[in-house]
Image: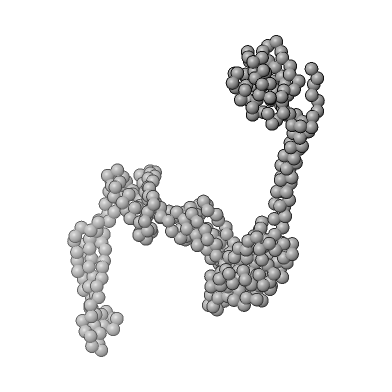
């Protein structure tokens, strides 16, 4: 049998196995299915070549006689050309994709505006378009310093502007001109600081430089936004720090209990002492003996005359007190102390809906402190 080394047409080599090979081959010949280079082996296997156009009929006949296909292999010049085109196509597609990706990074596709409140985004983009910056503008054709100057000159309502390129975006940070009483301290703006402790939930930067990100935990007084922006030359420009930052705010109330405490109590014994004054000078001072070892004095002043000659009486209430030592274990007043801490926390929450609340109790040497936390969502 002559081995097929090369043919123009697309052929396939098959290796099959079955007990009815003779019947199968006769049926194939009867159905005018042309086989090439048929080779039968002793283990009920056979090998042959067939044109690709007869492949469907071949498999139908093999199934009819329960013949198993052990191997299939493509041959021929046309198959080689098809494979080559397929591979070259994949390589070409990858190459073209890389070229397109590289080229796309050279253009501005999106314009992002930050810091505008009274000026519409469309108005700013329209001005940039008039200055020659549109979608698909090559990034290397944009002189950022000149663009900043031209935008300031074209839009008198803008006082400061910083323009940078980031990926395929042109990012414009600006500050609008404001009334004198808001703008008189330009250059001396203060940072935006957290007014409470909590976990940052969302951020909308208006202007300035962010110091935090979503998920950060901040304490009261921490800086959230610095009062400056950095222009395209790397220089800092002072702006008013503004942002809308929401967070899970922890409103904490604390209450302390002492197991052993010294307290002052009133016994109920009171002595009243009256003194009379004219023009602020004493004209009668009551001399009353005070028999109490401990006492508190509360005074009440009454005008006896409403004429041009003012006379006042100063009445003193001298109340006897005693200092006593109390021994009250925390467990006896636990609920009361926790409630006290909770009320302090709710007062700080300012009637905002709580999304969570919890408390902790710490004790040391007879002193117990309860920390109650109410978690709300609000602006920092």
Residue 281 image offset from top left, x and y in percent: 29, 81
Identify the residue at horizontal 23%, vertical 58% (top origin): 266
Please name the residue shown 74% across and 37% down the image: 82
Residue at 59%, 21% (x, y): give it.
Answer: 64
Position of 250 with respect to 235 (left or right) is left
Q: Position of residue 200 (x, y in %)?
A: 49, 54
* Image coords of residue 53 (percent x, y): 69, 31
Taking the spot 66% from the left edge, 24% from the top edge, the residue there is: 31
Q: Is residue 239 left or right of residue 293?
A: right
Quadrant (top left, top right, bottom left, bottom right) of the N terminus? top right
Q: Residue 344 lies in what quarter of the image? A: bottom left
Q: Nearer the viewer, residue 9 or 110?
A: 9
Q: Is residue 245 above or below residue 368?
A: below
User: In terms of depth relative to the viewer, which is nearer, 315 or 236?
Assistant: 236
Q: Residue lying furthest top in this view?
A: 42
Residue 167, how many percent across, how many down?
66, 56
């Amino acid at each position: 049998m002559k081995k097929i080394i090369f043919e123009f047409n697309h052929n396939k080599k098959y290796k099959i196995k079955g007990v009815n090979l003779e019947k199968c081959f006769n049926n194939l010949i009867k159905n005018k299915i042309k086989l090439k280079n048929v080779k039968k082996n002793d283990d009920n296997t056979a090998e042959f070549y067939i044109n690709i156009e007869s492949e469907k009929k071949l498999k139908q006949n093999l199934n009819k006689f329960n013949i198993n296909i052990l191997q299939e292999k493509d041959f021929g010049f046309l198959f080689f050309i098809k494979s080559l085109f397929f591979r070259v196509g994949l390589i070409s597609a990858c190459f073209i994709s890389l070229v397109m990706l590289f080229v796309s990074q050279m253009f501005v596709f999106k314009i992002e505006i930050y810091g505008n409140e009274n000026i519409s985004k469309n108005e700013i983009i329209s001005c940039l378009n008039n200055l020659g910056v549109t979608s698909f503008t090559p990034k290397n054709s944009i002189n950022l310093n000149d663009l900043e100057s031209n935008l300031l000159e074209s839009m008198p309502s803008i006082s400061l502007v910083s323009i940078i390129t980031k990926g395929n975006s042109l990012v414009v940070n600006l500050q609008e001109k404001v009334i004198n009483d808001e703008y008189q301290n330009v250059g001396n703006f203060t940072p935006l600081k957290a007014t409470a402790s909590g976990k940052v939930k969302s951020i909308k930067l208006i202007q300035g430089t962010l110091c935090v990100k979503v998920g950060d935990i901040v304490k009261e007084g921490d800086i959230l936004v610095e009062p400056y922006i950095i222009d395209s030359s790397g220089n800092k420009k002072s702006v008013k720090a503004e942002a809308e930052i929401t967070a899970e705010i922890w409103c904490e109330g604390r209450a302390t209990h002492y197991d052993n405490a010294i307290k002052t109590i009133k016994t109920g014994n009171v002595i009243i002492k009256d003194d009379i004054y004219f023009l602020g000078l004493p004209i009668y001072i009551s001399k009353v003996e005070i028999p109490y070892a401990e006492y508190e004095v509360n005074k009440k002043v009454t005008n006896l005359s409403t004429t041009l000659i003012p006379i006042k009486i100063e009445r003193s209430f001298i109340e006897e007190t005693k200092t006593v030592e109390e021994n009250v274990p925390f467990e006896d007043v636990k609920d009361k102390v926790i409630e006290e801490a909770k009320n302090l926390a709710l007062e700080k929450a300012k009637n905002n809906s709580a999304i969570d609340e919890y408390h902790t109790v710490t004790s040391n040497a007879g002193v117990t402190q309860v920390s109650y936390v109410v978690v709300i969502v609000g602006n920092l």
